[in-house]
Amino acid sequence: MAQDALDLSGLQTEAINEHTSNIDRVSTLQMCTMINDEDKTVAESVTACLEDVALAIDLLVPRVRAGGRVIYVGAGTSGRLGILDSSEILPTFAVPPTQFVGLIAGGDAAIREAQEGAEDSITAGRDDLAAMNLNGGQDSIIGIAASGRTPYVLGALEYAKSLGCLTLGVACVSPSEMGQSGNLDIMIAPLPGAEVITGSTRLKAGTATKLVLNMLSTGTMIKAGKTYGNMMVDLIASNQKLKQRSRNILRRVSRQCSTMTDQDLDDLLARCGGRVKVALLVADKGISVKESREQLEIAQGVLAKAIATEDKASVKTPLINGLKHHRLALCIDGGGSKCAALVGDTSGNLGKAVAGSCNLTDGEFEASVNAIVTAAREAFGNIPKSTNHINGINGSADSQLSSIANHSQSFDSIWIASAGMDRPGMRERVQAAVAQKLNLNKPIQMRVTNDVDLLAAAMARHPEISSSLVVIAGTGSIAIRYAYSNDDIVPRRVARTGGWGHLLGDEGAGYAIGRQAIRKTLFSLDNIRLARQKSGLSTLELKIVNIFSKYSSEGNDDALGIDLLSNVLMASDDKSAKSRIAGIAQTILDLAGSGDAEAVGIIAQQVSRFVDNTLTRLLDPQSRGYVDPSRSGLILSGGVMLHSVYQTIFQLALAKRNIRFSYTEAVPNAALVGVEHLLASHTLRPLPNCEITNPLL
């Protein structure tokens, strides 16, 4: 039962501090010593919450990267601390000015002067958030209340949760009304104990809150790529101090900038819109501002990743026919909905392309190979012309597309990854077919693997961890453990679960989500026609009917007049029933993001099945290759998994089961991971068994 709003006796922050009971009768130095001694305990109280803070950061990062807002809500000191933290993010990390926002009970006037009674209104908290036009699938709310029960904050959290926002709570008591409300995804509750002055939560509780907020915002920005090492490379030089800091960073990080004058550095920054990261790439790579921004976008804003590609070019490259050779790598990421190709070189030039479905699991061999070849040719044609010239390939885009079939020296290494490659003889068939169609007539490093193996290459970004789980939820789902042994440069599979295909399982994936939503709609339609259900279709069910009504030959907009089952299974378009059903998942995820309870329920149920029936079997200490999660990495990918709503529910499901990994990395661009790995491996030593004259793996 919630504590009486006027009863303060049970709160840790209201307890009497025996250590300072005589603070009004000691010397000034003794008084300061007492306060300082009490403050020393605050950091220790935050230490106990680090796992919760880390999980909160991991949940915030994908939402912030997607443009979602982080909104701090509080009253009094708590509200001011939220405003302070949010206001410092813009100049420090160059985020949009509306992305981190602080709300305080009583409005901006309460920043300087207490607004009596403002914090006591649940309705005010709801109304202030409603005015923000929240996006449940992207926005996150941090409710701050030292007592854990401020009505203004509770109202705001309840409203945010109803829309599907990520909700975090920060309080300095436990248990608390906030923590027991059911409206929080994560509760962070440092317990600094009794205040120096009884009930004055601006002291120890305020300091603990500030430490937590510092860690949440700073950690989120670090993980989002806003720093390089411990330097704030994404700052905006808005004053003289920050301008000088920008110059210092450029000189410290860039070889080219190390000897430049202040004026030259200022001119460079001006060309780059004041963005230090862009300026660093422009200076050291000699590329345009536009190209620098594109490379940072591909690297998800992480400067270390963008620089790493350039660093690989500095490794000695062999001479071919007496000329320095610009190495090119091709990576194909084949999936049920598309075939993505990425061509990259050792200077960071990239060419991208997408072709049709490439899923050998469905037995469409010729179509899949054609998709691979089409995507490869188009990606090659999309790399900067300077790179084509270096490789002896000139001319128009059309001639570039044909060049790939006439110049075996175009690619130095290729990685083709697609579902279905594990079938007996499939790798050799694909390898031979692709080599023939691309006219690759010289020994070349070519890997042909399952698509999950491609994601495992991301383990190279975390060399301190030798074992990781790769978990995919796309059209289907699978979990595989990989590990390095001895001097491997390619991690090896240790164990796997799932990946049975849509007909037999793959719970938690797009097909399973779409199937459950369609089954629910069909069930309701049957009940309405049988007069067993008096209410109409729900929002989710109407959405399903509307999506498939366009397949109806009659074009009937009346839900009851549509043959939903036929439209799902026998549509007139060129999509398979599997693709149509799996395609519903995006709609369900978006509905869940807007707070639709039925959609949230479907996603939560599928995530729970995926975790319990697939993932946890690899985490059983009796399973082959078991490594404790705390010493393992977690690599996430797949169109469904990368949706912020799904990823949030998935991470919360792990936390609920007390499963915490050493690191979690979401990989939105598996082909980029493959290109990075090929280029790095080529400068070191050849990958094992990778010439086209040898069958692979």
Image (cartoon, rainbow, N blue to C red):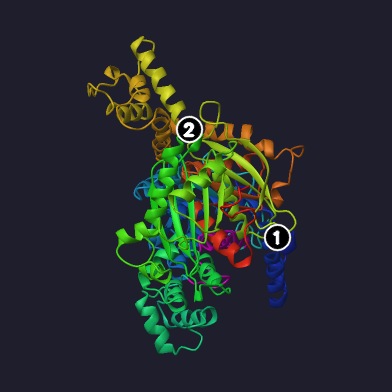
| Residue 205 sits inside the magenta stretch | yes
Q: Which residue is mark 1?
A: 44
Q: In the rendered view, tell whether residue 209 sits above or below residue 584.
A: below
Disc 1 secondary structure class: helix
**Rendered image: mark on residue 362:** 2
Q: Are marks 1 and 2 in contact (CB under 8 Å)?
A: no
Q: Mark 2 or mark 1, which is nearer the start of the sequence?
A: 1
Residue at the image point whose x is 37% and y is 72% from the top: 289
Expressed as whole percent of the image width and height from the top left, the position of residue 8 reads 60, 47
Instruction: Looking at the picture, tell me which residue is in the foreground, 208 or 108.
Output: 208
484 vs 230, left or right, is: right
Instruction: Looking at the picture, tell me which residue is in the foreground, 452 or 623.
Output: 452
Q: Quadrant of the N terminus?
A: top right
Main SS type for the magenta part? Answer: helix
Query: For the magenta stretch, what is the residue range?
Result: 204-233
Expressed as whole percent of the image width and height from the top left, the position of residue 423 reads 58, 36
Q: In the rendered view, tell whether residue 107 sits above or below residue 136.
A: below
Q: In the rendered view, tell whether residue 498 sits above or below residue 231.
A: above
| Residue 552 sits inside the magenta stretch | no
Instruction: Looking at the picture, tell me which residue is in the foreground, 26 or 272.
Output: 272
The kind of residue on which mark 1 rests is Glu
Q: In the rendered view, tell whether residue 649 sits above or below residue 12.
A: above
> In this view, which residue lies farthest toward the top?
530
Expressed as whole percent of the image width and height from the top left, the position of residue 531 reads 35, 10
